[in-house]
Amino acid sequence: MAGQNQKYIKIINSFGDLVLLNLAALAGYVSRFKGFDNFVESQFLSLLLYCNLAWITSASILNSYNIKRVTRVTSIVSNLIKQVILYILLVEASLNITKPYFFSREFLTYSYIYLTILMIGWRVGLTYLLKYHRIKGGNYKKVVIAGFGRASNQLRKYFESRPDTGYRFFGYFDDHSRNSSKFLGRIEELEEYVVQNEIDEIYCSAFELTSNQVAQIIDFAEDNLIRLKFIPEANLIQSRKLEVDFYDLLPIMNLRPIPLDDSFNMVVKRIFDIVFSFLVIVFILSWLIPVVGLLIKLDSKGPILFKQLRNGRDNKPFVCYKFRSMRVNDEADTKQATKDDDRVTRLGSFLRRTNLDELPQFFNVLLGDMSVVGPRPHPVKLNENYRRLIGRYMSRHLIKPGVTGLAQVKGYRGETSEPHQMKNRIKIDLFYIENWTFLLDIKIIMLTIYNMFKGEENAF
């Protein structure tokens, strides 16, 4: 079938990796020694063997070639960087233990740099080539859905809006007639249709079917070697990602840890926070604070910095720093800024519109209370109000709050006078928490910088 060539993609991917690995090593040799003189006579051929074994080992440990159709490019690059780091550690460990020959440190550094550049280009290029191929009609999977409901309809929209994933949706089967061109018949008609049309995958909305129907579909799928996947109940769609563990033969579903529960990811994010905040403080805030501080003093009476108690990771309160953008007032901790708010000073309006009022929070980042990117911290009073109104609101405190965040660059910044506005902000915050990657942080930072120069409609 058209969708059953995934194994060839894995072969191409792994073969291409090994070719580029050896090219990177050769390029490193040329960069160091300006040619291939004495290459064969030297022991670099032995080193290439170490390198290839180390790469294969790192790929095996990290399961690097288990790339699914729905895997995002950012996740592919993030996982590749992990593999490159593990590969370097394995090579260095092998050389330090065996020390059969001396290899130029400059050569090794060149080869690592070339490897990283070539691998990222190769993986990203191959991913987009596959997406293009699927959009044009290749490498597709034929799919149907058994059982119609809200979750099934969301899945149908996903299939139809994402041709790059290569899913060709044929329609629904349900015991209740549906006024839709995608309605194919009753559940009892599913088996004959699947066989005749060589369907690759069945997505089963088990909560819309009887237990006997589910058991029959499972038996049919297994007998006919058809992939069967289950759609969770509609009220579970917004929950955290699930994974399945087996207690002997009994499958148990559990909430999967978020990416930043992983120690490696946590260390990477913290190192970046320290380096980035230190650079901002030294090269920007060192001169900006005196300049902005003087302007604030000239514009209105009061302190330069506004200090407010906000909730951080695990809902622990901390003192958050901002440039003061309002006149000193008694409602600062209880009332959000609104459009044309008379409390906002002339200078404060500019600071808020350009996000410059948030820059002192890089001290919070350096101290460890905040991260460069994360859900924006809310005042304690606002937290108490919304935690009672919005489901999963407190889940945003699973990680450190950020100076900027995905919700902010998506337009959910400023006043949230209506509950639906806060719900949308929380939904995006939770998406970020559950799908964090280092490259996503970089993208959010770039968008934040762009918005600073462009100005934002909701910043007031």
Image (tube, rainbow, N blue to C red):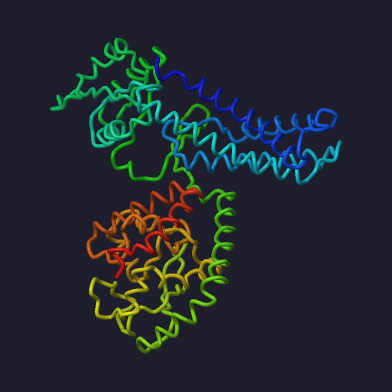
Taking the spot 56% from the left edge, 58% from the top edge, the residue there is 272
Is 314 situated left or right of 214 in this image? right
Q: Is residue 303 above or below residue 107?
A: below
User: Residue 24, percent across and down?
Assistant: 67, 36
Is 316 situated left or right of 32 in this image? left
The N terminus: image quadrant? top left
The C terminus: image quadrant? bottom left
Taking the spot 44% from the left edge, 39% from the top edge, the residue there is 72
Q: Is residue 46 above or below residue 369?
A: above
- Is residue 43 in sight in this rendering? no
Asked whether 455 or 89 is in front, the reply is: 455
- Is residue 310 in sight in this rendering? yes
User: Residue 328, percent across and down?
Assistant: 34, 85
Q: Is residue 202 above or below residue 117?
A: above
Taking the spot 15% from the left edge, 27% from the top edge, the residue there is 178
Is 240 situated left or right of 188 in this image? right
Taking the spot 27% from the left edge, 24% from the top edge, the residue there is 146
Is 51 situated left or right of 456 in this image? right
User: Residue 369, percent across and down?
Assistant: 51, 67
